Amino acid sequence: MLKPVESVDDSHALEHAMAAVAAAMADPSRVKMLCALMDGRAWTATELSAVADVASSTASAHLSKLVSSHLISCLSQGRHRYYRLAGQDIAELLERMMGISWRSPSAARVTTPPSLRHARTCYDHLAGEVAVDIFDAMVKQAWLTADGTVLTDYGHRQFAEMGIALNRKTRRKLCCGCLDWSERRFHLGGEAGAAFFSHAERQGWLTRVTGFREVIITSAGRLSFKKWFNNVQSAVRSGPGSGDD
């Protein structure tokens, strides 16, 4: 039996839409811009043109294509225009694509900068060695269920004791495992992951490297992670660029 015409049309429309998104990402300069925006912050066109190493006029054309494909959004503030990823779902798509792109784990470990592997942002939450070790510790200590998809009652109490307030009214998943592209293991995503990162940043447990996705775990952060997560080694030791002895 033939499918109704409208179903065929819908299927074709979806296929064309998917092809358009793929085409928007199929350019090294645009990929560089998208990767830069993975730090969760808004960037100007000038900053993104520098990241992509292209002229301002070329950057403008690239940004226009990314906006029209709904991969990024543009915010005007005064005379300035800022660009950021269109949402958490786009960040998750990019993170998964990074993982797919590194088919060989050994190749990823050799070519990925140590500082980026150690700790970095994944849009609005923590990624890298430190993040996956903290995720594993949360599962082991029963903050999370065994599959890492649910924050347990004990986990809720621990978050509250840590001083982290979770937004229970958000449409976003409260908790989920986000596959880390460099470590091939999960780190904490969802509302809980974002809230944990924001809290750690406010407490001075970590600092961002301006203009990059790298994150530096401070001495205060190492002490706090040692306290809460039973001596997670990657978080306790000084990471690349920490400046500690």
Image (cartoon, rainbow, N blue to C red):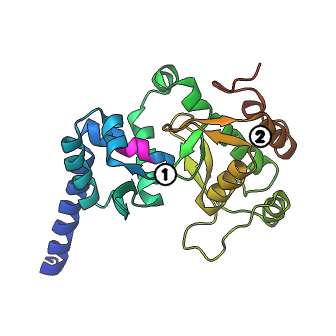
| 1 and 2 marks in contact (CB < 8 Å) | no
Left or right, 46 with reference to 154: left
Q: Where is residue 182 drawn, in percent x and y?
A: 53, 34
Q: Which residues are magenta?
A: 33-37
Q: Position of residue 236 (x, y in %)?
A: 78, 32
Q: Which residue shows up at 41% across the image and 49% down it? A: 43
Find disc 1 in the rendering and name its residue.
41
Secondary structure beneath dot 1 equals: loop
The secondary structure type at the circle numbered 2 is helix
The overriding secondary structure of the stretch rendered in magenta is: helix
Which quarter of the image is occupied by the N terminus? bottom left
Compared with 160, 52 (above or below) is above
Whether residue 147 is visible to the viewer of this picture, yes or no, is: no
* Mark found first going from the N terminus, 1 or 2: 1
Picture layout, residue 205 above or below residue 104: below
Give the percent coordinates (x, y) of residue 191.
62, 63
Q: Quadrant of residue 198?
A: bottom right
**Residue 221: mark in rendering:** 2
188 and 75: which one is in front? 75
Name the residue at 82% across, 57% down.
162
**Residue type of the residue flagged with mark 2:** Gly
